[in-house]
Image (cartoon, rainbow, N blue to C red):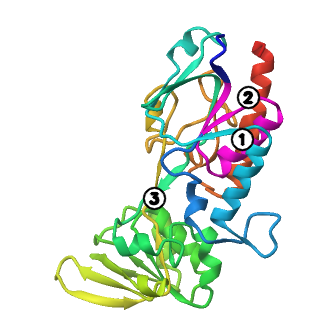
Amino acid sequence: MPDNVSNVVIIGSGCSGLTAALYAARANLKPIVIDGHEPGGQLALTTLVENFPGFPEGIQGPELIENMRKQAERFGAELRSGHVVKVDMSQRKLDIGKQPIEIDLGREKLLSRTLIIASGASARWLGLPSEQALIGHGVTSCATCDGFFFAGKEITVIGGGDSAMEEALFLTRFATKVTIIHRRSEFRASKIMLDRARHNDKIVFMTDTVVEEVHDPALKEVTGLRLRNVKTGRDFDFPTSAMFLGIGHTPNAGFVGDQLKRDGEGYIVPESYVCTNVPGVFVSGDVADRRYRQAVTAAGTGCMAALEVEKYLEEIGK
């Protein structure tokens, strides 16, 4: 292959992408990491992280990501800002191992022998300015990550599907009361999940209601919600200590089109572990994980993807 072809390009600079970069760099593969449209991934939007191994007192999410970046760069990883428009794997399918993968960044194109897609999944938000101002300060999309911080308090979950029910049920371990707020009178959740929530005496339901405002950005904490009943039009304030978004995630995989197997919601479906249906293309982290979505599981699959890259390059003759 020409000299301008990299050994591996990694799309995504969250926990998964940076772990992959670290392992690939230590294998002397000189990985190139593309930040993507959410540099640092979900960890960059969080505050205190207490469930990542090795930090007994916890660590701030942005600090953890910055440490990972420095560690990967120390061993030779190259980090670049940019957003991937599309990737072209068509020639790789036709001529296994001999044709490079093309990564289009809009302003430039990169060629690589292998590709790790670690572009993550973005939480769906309501889109309110007050909500955005309080992300990491009582507004969150991860019950597993942040539920512990609201032990003994009354909190809310927004949504009406299985994600909302799962979040609410988990949060009852900590909160004294969990109010599920849904904009419709009917729920999209499966019967079994809805029944579980309805039979939990800590969970109450507020239907036909939408969030108009989150209080209070000035205090840098959630103190309540401004709500509106969509049937009556009545506005009212509702006190709460936290707002958990349970309206799902969107995998950042649009740039692959139909070149890789994806499920109905767009998540990439591996053939086995982190290997995709295209030789030399691997996937790690939340872009393929709709179940766990944890920093430690993302890091684990990032490690796996880098090890598979190393093995693949040895097999085809790097």
Residue 158 visible in the shown view: no
Q: Amino acid at mark 3?
A: Gly
Q: Amino acid at mark 1?
A: Ala
154 over 293 or under it: above or below: below
Q: In 3D space, how far apart are the residues under numbered discs 2 and 3 (Cα atoms)?
A: 31 Å
Q: Which residues are magenta?
A: 7-33
Looking at the image, is mark 2 or mark 3 nearer the viewer?
A: 2
Residue that lies at the very extreme toward the left in this rendered image: 232
Residue 248 is tagged as: 3
- Based on the picture, tell me whether residue 296 belongs to the magenta stretch: no
Identify the mark nearer the N-term, 2 or 3.
3
Q: Amino acid at mark 2?
A: Val
Residue 20 is tagged as: 1
Q: Position of residue 38 (x, y in %)?
A: 51, 51
* Image quarter hosting the C terminus: top right
Quadrant of the rendered image containing residue 182: bottom left
Q: Which residue is mark 2?
A: 309
Count numbered badges in the picture.
Answer: 3
Identify the mark nearer the N-term, 1 or 3.
1
Mark 1 residue element: helix
Q: Are marks 1 and 3 in contact (CB under 8 Å)?
A: no
Q: Position of residue 30 (x, y in %)?
A: 73, 31
Q: Position of residue 53 (x, y in %)?
A: 80, 63
